[in-house]
Amino acid sequence: MAHVRSHVLICAGTGCASSGSKRVFSAFESEIAKKGLSEEIKIVETGCHGFCEAGPLVIIYPEGTFYVRVGVNDVTEIVENHLYKGRIVERLLFKDKMTLASVPKYSEIDFYKKQIRMVLANCGQIDPDSIDEYIANGGYEALGKALTEMTPDQVVDEVKKSGLRGRGGGGFPTGMKWSFTKGAAGDKKYVVCNADEGDPGAFMDRSVLEGDPHRVIEGMAICGYSIGADEGYIYCRAEYPLAIKRLRTAIVCAEEMGLLGYNILGTGFNFKVKIKEGAGAFVCGEETALLASIEGKRGMPRPRPPFPAISGLWEKPTNINNVETFANIPHILTKGAEWYASIGTEKSKGTKVFALTGKINNTGLAEVPMGITMREIIYDIGGGIPDGKKFKAVQIGGPSGGCLPEQLLDLSVDYDSLIQAGAMMGSGGLVVMDEETCMVDLSKFFLSFTQAESCGKCTPCREGTKRMLEILTRITEGEGKEGDIELLEKLAKGIKATALCGLGQTAPNPVLSTLRYFRHEYEAHIRDKKCPAGACSKLSGFFITDGCKGCGLCKKACPVDAISGEMKGKHVIDHNKCIKCGACVAKCPFKAIIKG
Amino acid sequence: MDMVSLTIDGRKAIVPAGSTIIEAAAAVGIKIPALCYHPELKPEGACRVCVVEIKGGRGPVASCVFPVAEGMEVYTNTASIRDARKTVVELLLANHPQDCLTCQRSTNCELQAIAADLGVREIPFEGEKKHCAIDDNNPSLVRDQNKCILCGRCIRACNERQEMHVYSFINRGFNTMVSPAFDQGIDKVACTYCGQCASVCPTAAIVERDNTEDVFRAINDPTKHVVVQTAPAVRVALGEDLGQGVGGIVTGKMVAALRRLGFDGVFDTDFTADLTIMEEGTEFLGRLKNGGTLPMITSCSPGWVNFIELQYPDLLGHLSTCKSPQQMFGALAKTFYAKQKGIDAKDIVSISVMPCTAKKAEAVRPEMRSSGYQDVDYVITTRELARMIKSAGVDFSVIPEEDYDAPLGLSTGAAVIFGATGGVMEAALRTVYEVVTGETLACLDFKMVRGLEGIKEATVDVGGIAVKVAVAHTLANAKILMDKIRAGTADYHFIEIMACPGGCIGGGGQPFVNDKKTRQERIDAIYECDSCMPMRKSHENPAVKALYEQYLGEPNGHKSHELLHTHYNAQKR
């Protein structure tokens, strides 16, 4: 390897790529070439760093300087000053929102300080298309150890001892799952990786696959060895083209090196990995629907038992885990189960990656130890709520999860505490809401998602979510009736009890948890025909107060001519015409137009 | 067999390992309500009506799919289970037209019955209902998706029984529906019109096209002479829809009822079943002697004929050129019978009562106009006849039995067994044996071709020739034999195929209960009819003999070919 003095790491995760990191990469190439530095500076396209809010991100090593929101026009300056003259470009550094001070180093930014990056360790640090870089960072060491120093039983035991639980949503103990498949009768077994990440706002699996694909493949191979499977499938949604591309490259590289395929590392263990692209149905994230989809059938869940461990893909014993679960495996084997189990709480071990979205300053991916509080995630890592607004609730666990209010901000984030609070870990989506979010509207949003994504097989999910959505729509439009809340509760209870699969059974959760913590908002909609958050457009409107000086700016701004009034006289809004766009509010120099 | 012991509602049940809870409950006299469940189809676990609680379980489970385990404690009637079931049914009804009073399946609908059983008294949900176009662009079946509860039984029946794979679920969530490929009508896809989908449908989402009003209109038209023929399988099933129990033989009452309905001639398809044996037997012997295409395959079942025309057109040469008994009857009614009665064929309306929905499509095939008119004008199913009888106020339980009219109502026991799988073969063997050997059969019962086994094989010595025969029912089994013929590994001489399970007695137009037990009882009744007949061999039917003497000449002769035989063409759908 040629000796280089500096590495320029440019994030090429989907977030940064969509904010222009590809062009930044090209600009660096040409600028560095112009300066004649191509020999001594290496530019690397990496996976996601997680801090998508501040992208495109550029990190320069060995200093570890962290540049944020780098545009094509900034590249000349970075090359000239930082790489050529050794001067940090102050204006592109991350600035702490509280102290307003520039933070030059990656590791010192609050967003990263409280994180423990295991699953994401390589994301943003290595070139995901380079197997050499993965190996240089300890990659495939775990597989080597398993194949040469451990029996399959020892591997399963180690995973059991680590306390790792499924990261896809259910939280089932991974080691136990492996031992079921291992113990199932059958010569042919399969390992399946569930990469059909579909929760709104969730992108942790995508980032792992894009930023560190080998880690997942290694985890799968270790699983294959331990349960006696020689074939694996990664079921990845087709909407993740970059992840699929990187996985394909990774599989080819690993096969070329003898780390996948036949006779791996000369041990006689065979393991092939295939990719199956999902066609974009949320329900295919449910394991039995996923298996049906791989088999070429309509992606619909089937009742269990039999569980996939006994009768899965093509009716063979099959172990299915989520991307993040597999990505944890190499760490457990190299560093040991005890080390792994030392992170987290008594029943939830290790770390969890969360996707922070919604009304939060630092949207992005954060990997935190289990047991951290919601407050630490939202305020310390996430940087709190933008524009000085007040925190209202956080939806955790995607559309199957629940909504937690402010009084639960100090709740320990682990599988069991979340279930108790009426939410769930889910795959790790965190949607933060501020005071302007209406909780009925929020339930409606999630219900409309689950309703649209219901596979249609079982009655409660197909018909019940539709009726719940209709009731919620009615409530948000001011047509709510006495008895609607009870009807919602009846439906929610019925669906939870009788739906066929996990998606249906959890579909009412957003409604139940918002009813539990924000029942008064439902009541206000129904009884007072008011939306306390002012979010439901049919229940709120704009009013011109006595502060109006009659300047006429609002009248000019209104796109539908809903405002009338004489110059220097108080203006009024015709609520039948008003489309609640808010253009008048923005224009009023006297802050005389209010929402209510 | 390994047995498992469990308790259901406190009652001990000992059932074979691998049973589902719903099966175990049935064994101890607990009928768990269910809609997607059908005892003969793979369980789906979709409707969620059959939920039960298991002690220590995480929540209710679908009893149609959940396997029993040793020591399991099941509760089927707790307050929460009753609530859950009721909510599920309320949800189904909320997205249903609720037009029970005017529905073709009113009082004979599983959804209606379950709602009544569960005591659903109001539907608390209101909102959007599905609005699907009705698929009725074919002669046989009407599909009204608005009444569909998405239980998927039709899909499974079509896949598992018939291997036709016409239907699948399309769209998602609330917009899910059952549909042929690309949401086309069943007339545009490879559907055989066998009606097994209708026969398992719990609601009126798939029903036979109702021709009862057409028939009433014809009867009430004083310028028309209306004749009716009844297929063998109708007489052993019609009673089920008229309060007579399963397996009852209601031939005489049916004839009486038809007369009361106003038909001018009440005849029997059995007459032309005997005629079929004469024609088909002669054709078979001809092929055997002259090196014709073998195995020869029967052509009575129109669902089967559609199947081979759709799926195995390369094997059409194997099919007997004989028309089905229904069409032979139709051709004779408007020629021979018209002439005999001195009635112009245009004034005859020919009705047939069939256990079959595909017969409706068969009657309108362009080939089936040997008389110069459509030979059979309207086909009604057993279910439709039952409705007509009720509608006309004929009290089936009290009317005395009557006999068919002569001569087209005279038949032998060989004809009535056409209604059961293996019957055509047995009837043919009785005649072929005696014609070839000139000897009288000591025992007329060819038991090896009887019964509900999917594919039956036998070798019969016919005057020194070992005739190898096979009998299949359901198209899934037909497919197995066809693949064998295609592969050149079928060394049979003669094959009987019926599209429906158990043969015509399990047809798509029969009363709705269509399970193995019911089919066996209907079959038993068929063989009882046979054993009670004074004559049991087709070639002994004096009316058939007279027909040849007076009109047709000889079997497979010129006139026969004109009226009783046809040809088949590949269907491209």
Image: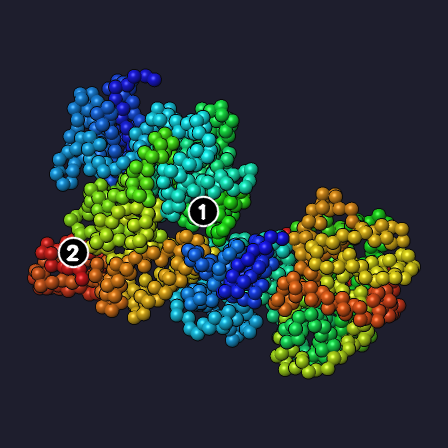
Q: Secondary structure at mark 2?
A: helix
The residue positioned 46% from the left and 35% from the top of the image is: A153
Say whether marks 1 and 2 touch (CB < 8 Å). Answer: no
Which label sits on residue A287?
A: 1
- Please tell me which residue lies in front, B352 or B205: B205
How many neighbours does mark 2 have within 10 angstroms: few (below 14), some (14-19), or many (20 or more)?
A: many
Q: What residue type is disc 2 on? A: Val
Residue on which disc 2 sits: A585
Relative placement, left or right, of B46 versus B552 is left
The colouring scheme, among rainbow, by chain, secondary structure or one colour, is: rainbow
Of callouts 1 and 2, the N-terminal one: 1
Q: Secondary structure at mark 1?
A: helix
The residue positioned 69% from the left and 53% from the top of the image is: B478
Q: What residue type is disc 1 on? A: Glu
Total numbered labels placed on residues in the image: 2
- The picture places residue A305, in percent across and down from the top left corner, at 49, 51
